[in-house]
Amino acid sequence: EADIYQTPRYLVIGTGKKITLECSQTMGHDKMYWYQQDPGMELHLIHYSYGVNSTEKGDLSSESTVSRIRTEHFPLTLESARPSHTSQYLCASSPGQGYNSPLHFGNGTRLTVT
Amino acid sequence: KNQVEQSPQSLIILEGKNCTLQCNYTVSPFSNLRWYKQDTGRGPVSLTIMTFSENTKSNGRYTATLDADTKQSSLHITASQLSDSASYICVVREYSGGGADGLTFGKGTHLIIQP
């Protein structure tokens, strides 16, 4: 098992609240990612980072933001949660080099916005 | 547009039986193909990776095959166990990389092993 941690595991909040999903890894990986996963659907990339102070938006349009101030930490923030944000959010990391390196995933945060 | 299609969408088999999951892709140029296992409530875990020059690779009771000419891969599970119940996700990487490593994900096959 990879050492990548996500908190909280489950979160139920009301519409309009600001939330931050935490993700930390202890492997020293340069690359980190946030994916959104809905039941029976493929993972969609919402943000990624190739190192400290580097962040990019992914393929899926998202109203969230991320930061990468430290190598091990990649939090995702929703300024104003809406019911459409209800989903599972998966954080992942991988080493900086090599095409064959796997993604190491956390166990996800299941977010419900009421 | 790059696509990864997996079949079947779901599968139920009895414990001890074998099964084969399919993955077809249109990703080009191709770099590698990886199978992940995702247990309920957990993140995906890598099972095996196939590069262009490989056509078979095993990991315990899991055997992956790749036909790069027809752009098809399969994951064969031998002597299934209850712990094999999970979703199996096929992920194909584009050679040129692109944004965030150029990964295209399939929707997965949901496998249920019944005692």
Image: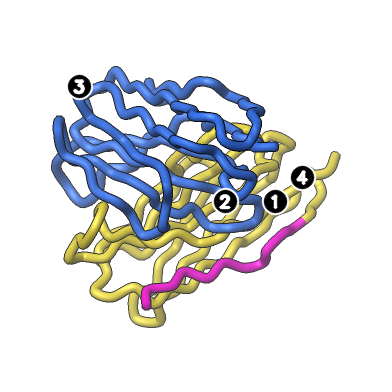
Q: Is residue A82 left or right of residue B36?
A: right
**Circle 3 sits on which residue?**
A70
**Circle 1 sits on which residue?**
B111
Residue type at mark 3 is Arg
- Which residue occupies 49% across, 21% down? A7
Q: Is residue B114 left or right of residue B73?
A: right
**Circle 4 sits on which residue?**
B113
Nearer the viewer's eye, disc 4 or disc 2? 2
Q: Are marks 1 and 4 in contact (CB under 8 Å)?
A: yes
**Circle 2 sits on which residue?**
B88
Residues packed near mark 1 inside 10 Å, few (<14), some (14 to 19) or many (20 plus): some
In the image, are marks 3 and 2 on the same chain? no
User: Mark 2 falls on what kind of element?
Assistant: strand
Q: Quadrant of residue A5?
A: top left
Answer above or below: position of B94 versus B2.
Answer: above
In the image, are marks 4 and 2 on the same chain? yes
Q: Are marks 4 and 2 in contact (CB under 8 Å)?
A: no
Residue A76 lies, in percent from the top left, at: 39, 33
Subunit of label 1: B
Residue A33 lies, in percent from the top left, at: 33, 41
Residue type at mark 4 is Ile
Is residue B4 highlighted in magenta? Answer: yes
Residue type at mark 1 is Leu
Q: CA distance from mark 1 to mark 4?
A: 7 Å
In-front residue for pair B84/B93: B93
Q: Which chain is yellow?
A: B
Q: Which chain is blue?
A: A
Nearer the viewer's eye, disc 4 or disc 3? 3
Subunit of label 3: A
The magenta stretch spans which residues? B1-11
Residue B91 lies, in percent from the top left, at: 42, 57
